Image: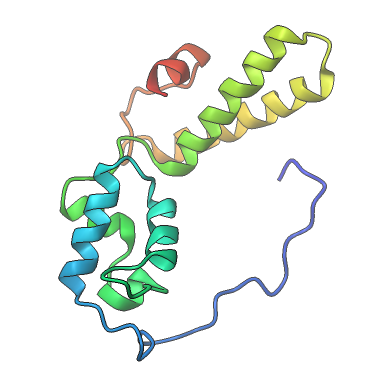
C-alpha cells in the first residue's frame, strides 16, 4: 500500500485437492510436530517452512492443510499453543521498534521517518481489525507497549 512496488502476478499456489502420494505421514504426527515447534518459540509461518524443509519422520510436508485438513494456526488453537499476538501484527511492531531506534540515533533521516509513519499506520489498521477477537478490546498501539510486548 505504501510502496512503489507492483503486485506479483502469477504467485498463486497451484490448486490441489489431496496431498501428494509420496507424503504419507500420519495426521497426529504432523499435529504433534506443529505443537513441538510452537513450544520452541517458532511462528506459524516458520513452522510451515520447517515442515516443508525438514518434515516429519524424514518425510517433507508440502502443505499442512492438505495433509491434516486444518491450518497451522487452527492446530495451535486446538492445543492452546497459539501466540498471544497475531504474527503479522508482531512483525510490524518489531519493524516499528527498529525504525524508532534508528530515528533516535539519526534524527535527520527523513526517509526513515516516513517509513515509521507508514508502519505505525499499518499497525493501527491491523489493531482495529483484530480488536476484540485476537487482542483485547481496549488495546491501543504505542512504542512503549510494543517494546514491552517484544
Is residue 55 left or right of 112 when viewed as pictured? left
Name which residue lies at 17% across and 46% down: 80
Pick whichever, 134 or 27, lies toward us.
27
Q: Quadrant of residue 11?
A: bottom right
Q: Quadrant of residue 145?
A: top left
Q: Position of residue 105 (x, y in %)?
A: 72, 8
Name which residue lies at 44% across and 53% down: 45
Q: Position of residue 69 (x, y in %)?
A: 27, 74
Q: Quadrant of residue 129?
A: top left
Q: Position of residue 102 (x, y in %)?
A: 69, 16
Is residue 54 left or right of 106 when viewed as pictured? left
Name which residue lies at 76% across and 23% down: 112
Name which residue lies at 77% across and 10% down: 106
Q: Is residue 38 above or below residue 25?
A: above
Q: Is residue 21 above or below residue 85?
A: below
Q: Position of residue 89 (x, y in %)?
A: 47, 37
Pick whichever, 28 or 91, lies toward us.
28
Is residue 142 left or right of 24 when viewed as pictured? right
Is residue 18 left or right of 118 when viewed as pictured? left
Query: Which quadrant: the C terminus?
Result: top left
Amino acid at each position: 500500500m505504501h510502496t512503489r512496488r507492483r503486485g506479483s502476478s502469477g504467485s498463486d499456489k497451484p490448486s490441489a485437492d489431496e496431498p501428494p502420494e509420496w507424503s504419507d505421514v500420519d495426521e497426529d504426527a504432523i499435529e504433534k510436530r506443529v505443537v513441538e515447534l510452537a513450544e520452541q518459540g517458532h511462528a506459524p509461518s516458520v513452522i510451515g517452512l520447517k515442515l516443508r524443509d525438514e518434515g516429519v519422520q524424514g518425510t517433507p510436508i508440502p502443505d499442512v492443510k492438505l495433509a491434516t485438513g486444518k491450518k497451522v494456526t487452527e492446530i495451535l488453537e486446538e492445543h492452546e499453543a497459539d501466540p498471544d499476538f497475531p504474527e503479522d501484527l508482531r512483525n510490524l511492531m518489531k519493524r516499528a521498534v527498529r525504525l524508532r531506534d534508528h530515528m533516535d540515533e539519526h534524527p535527520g533521516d527523513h526517509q526513515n521517518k516516513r517509513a515509521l509513519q507508514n508502519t505505525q499506520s499499518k499497525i493501527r489498521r491491523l489493531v482495529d481489525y483484530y480488536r476484540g477477537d485476537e487482542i483485547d478490546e481496549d488495546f491501543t498501539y504505542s512504542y512503549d507497549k510494543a517494546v514491552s510486548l517484544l
